[in-house]
Amino acid sequence: MINKNFNSLYDLLKAFPDEQACIDHLEALRWGGKVVSPFDETSTVYECKGNKYRCRNTGRYFNVKTGTMLDNTKIVLQKWFVAVWLVTSHKKGISSHQLARDIDVTQKTAWFMLHRIRKCFGIENDNDLDGNVEVDETYVGGKNKNRHVSKKVENCQGRSTKDKTPVVGMVSRGGKLNARKVDNVQAKTLSREVMRHVKSSASLHTDEWCGYNSLSKIYEHFVVHHGAGVYVDGVAHTNTIEGFWSLLKRGIIGIYHFTSQKHLQNYIDEFVFRYNTRTNTEAQRFNLLLANTEVRTTYRRLVNG
């Protein structure tokens, strides 16, 4: 079932024409032929009618959707499969309004589905990086000069976080990328994020921001002086990570228009997932996400925190 070839939305619909075909595919991805209880991995499992199973040790019933983003969903799996396909294959994502029209659900339902899917994108945002690693920070939240006079914020120039959210990113040239929302871009914060994900054998490439200075004690550190109008100095540059910032911001501005600080990390995870799987086929990216859906959230938690 996993070997089905589908490189377009039309192929996807042909490969999964009904609910049973979707269930069979999910079981193959999640369990690989051996059903495992989500309540007790060591338990014997009994097969029941209607694609249900029973955990012997706990006595509880479950199916392939239990404990995943699909748990207790009332939406047919074919619509979920189309939603996953669209959000993973569209380079800048898809809005809840557009998804609602595409799969014939309400905008509220589409918004909830997309946030459930985004909760699973974090699987590609925790990589160990080595080699030539570029590190940079950016700010998400718009420019003060573009705001209505009633919404302008005083004293928010430069690296102020009063009206913008800082994000630090690091990418291994030709390899994986990590990006995290942070509270500030002080040396302590940046050093913590870098040392968490970048191996000491790596060569670090940053701009001249003083928050990176202490990292020279740990890494081979190349600095490019953007303030002096220099953007490439031999091997030193941060063009790769800045290219990702462009993708992230174009997606937010062009597709989502606005992201709250509360949900920003989930949107970042979405763009990181697509970047890190850029060499995968559409089917491989689709299956990778479906095989890692054991992250579940509720509507109340999304709305209320």
Image (spheres, rainbow, N blue to C red):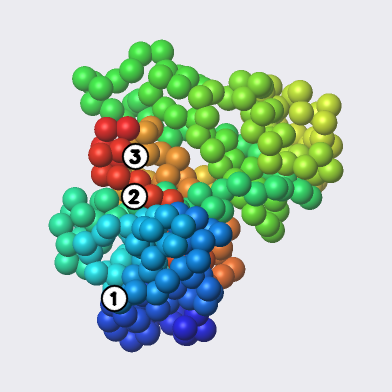
Q: Between 28 and 135, which is closer to the camera in this rendering? A: 28
Q: Position of residue 126 (x, y in %)?
A: 60, 46
Give the vertical position of 24 relative to 162 (above or below): below
Q: Earlier in the sequence, mark 2 or mark 3?
A: 2
Label 2 residue SS: helix
How packed mark 2 is, by other alpha carbons closer than 10 Å (few <14, some 14-19, many 20 or more), is many
| CA distance separating discs 2 and 3 | 12 Å
Identify the residue shown where x is 27% and y is 57%.
72
Give the vertical position of 29 relative to 173 (above or below): below
Q: Earlier in the sequence, mark 1 or mark 3?
A: 1
Give the residue at mark 3.
259
Identify the residue shown where x is 35% and y is 25%.
144
Label 1 residue SS: loop
Label 3 residue SS: loop
- Give amino acid for label 3: Thr
- Give amino acid for label 1: Gly
Give the residue at mark 2.
115
When asked about the image quadrant of residue 215, the answer is top right
Q: On residue 50, which mark appears?
A: 1
Look at discs 1 and 3 and give the one toward the viewer.
1
Q: Earlier in the sequence, mark 2 or mark 1?
A: 1
Q: Position of residue 213 (x, y in %)?
A: 74, 24
Identify the residue shown where x is 52% and y is 77%.
33
